[in-house]
């Protein structure tokens, strides 16, 4: 699957309607973003079960602000509409593959139970 452009119009539906979503926050003027772009695109071709979305932070400032994006590129992984991973900087291809595999292997029932327990403590 090729990457998809994620905007304010399709952000929520992209997260809600897909089990596993990885987002690349980028800008056209960003040198490290240009380095990460081909890595992200190649991973999208190798992982057809995952939605790979690109969010241009210049055009989608509201999304970037809501998610607290402070530097780019930033990679975020959501599974079942739950944020599992967020990291600024260029991820090497091997690291990207590893975090995707970890996200696939998580027991989401356990993740939700832990989230609920934390909420109850607060």
Image: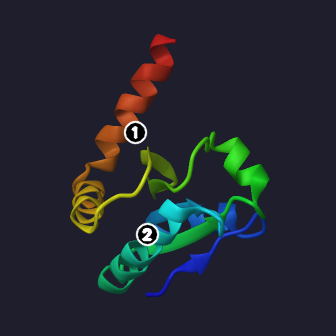
In the visual, does 3 lie left or right of 39? right
Question: How busy is the neighbourhood of tag 1: few (under 14 within 10 Å), some, or many (20 plus)?
Answer: few
In the visual, does 46 lie left or right of 120? left
Quote the CA–CA distance across marks 2 and 1.
Answer: 35 Å
In the rendering, at what x and y percent does residue 22 appear? 46, 63
| Residue ID at (34%, 58%) | 91
The residue singled out by tag 2 in the image is: 35
| Residue ID at (57%, 46%) | 71
| Residue ID at (58%, 70%) | 54
SS class, disc 2: helix
Examine the image and state in which quarter residue 13 appears. Answer: bottom right
Asked whether the beta carbons under mark 2 and mark 1 sit within 8 Å of each other, the answer is no
In the rendering, at what x and y percent does residue 112 appear? 40, 39
Farthest residue in the top direction?
A: 121
Q: Residue 112 — which label?
A: 1
Q: Earlier in the sequence, mark 2 or mark 1?
A: 2
């Amino acid at each position: 699957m090729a990457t998809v452009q994620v905007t304010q119009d399709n952000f929520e539906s992209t997260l809600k309607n897909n089990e596993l979503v990885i987002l690349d926050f980028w800008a056209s003027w960003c040198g490290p973003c240009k380095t990460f772009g081909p890595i992200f695109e190649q991973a999208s071709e190798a992982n057809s079960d995952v939605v790979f979305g690109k969010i241009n932070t210049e055009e989608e400032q509201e999304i970037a602000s809501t998610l607290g994006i402070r530097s780019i590129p930033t990679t975020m992984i959501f599974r079942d509409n739950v944020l599992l991973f967020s990291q600024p900087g260029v991820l090497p291809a091997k690291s990207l593959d590893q975090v995707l595999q970890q996200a696939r292997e998580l027991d989401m029932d356990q993740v939700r139970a832990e989230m609920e327990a934390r909420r109850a403590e607060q």
